[in-house]
């Protein structure tokens, strides 16, 4: 279960909440900037060094892949925003990179 403080960290202006089954230990969100989807899953800290696992998928992908292991929800949110910044910068730079039409031999 997520605490009120942890849920409040998820900025509704930045994220869209896709799923939050109250009885389960995960929340699925989507970044409004990149449309990437994320699952923040809380685990029992007694059985794992990292109590939170962060899963990620890009738009158009079917399945999630494990992206990070975190200690708290605020670290997850910072990681997601950092990833968004990287993705947006990469997409911006790719627009201006000139690629050769022919392979050089």
Image (tube, helix red, strand yellow):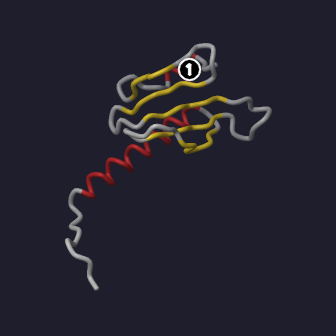
Q: Who's the residue at 74% across and 32% down the image?
A: 45
Q: Mark 1 Cα within 10 Å, few/some/many (few <14, many 20+)?
A: few
Q: Percent position (x, y) of residue 105?
A: 28, 86
Left or right placement of residue 58 versus residue 26 in this view: left
- Residue 19 in the image: above or below residue 94: above
Q: Which residue is mark 1?
A: 5
Number of on-image labels: 1
Q: Who's the residue at 27% across and 58% down the image?
A: 94
Label 1, secondary structure: give it. helix
Q: Percent position (x, y) of residue 10?
A: 47, 26
Left or right placement of residue 92 versus residue 69 in this view: left
Q: Percent position (x, y) of residue 39?
A: 53, 32
Left or right placement of residue 94 versus residue 57 in this view: left
Q: Residue furthest toward the bottom?
A: 105
Q: Who's the residue at 56% across and 23% down the image?
A: 6
The front one of 105 and 43 is 105
- Residue 97 in the image: above or below residue 27: below
């Amino acid at each position: 279960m997520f605490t009120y403080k942890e849920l409040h960290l998820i900025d509704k202006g930045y994220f869209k909440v896709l799923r939050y089954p109250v009885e389960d230990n995960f929340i699925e969100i989507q970044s409004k900037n990149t449309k990437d989807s994320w699952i923040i899953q809380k685990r029992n800290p007694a059985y794992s060094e990292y109590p939170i696992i962060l899963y990620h998928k890009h738009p158009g992908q079917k399945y999630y892949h494990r992206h990070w292991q975190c200690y708290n929800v605020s670290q997850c949110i910072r990681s997601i925003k950092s990833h968004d910044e990287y993705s947006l910068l990469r997409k911006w730079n790719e627009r201006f990179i000139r690629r050769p039409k022919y392979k050089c031999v």
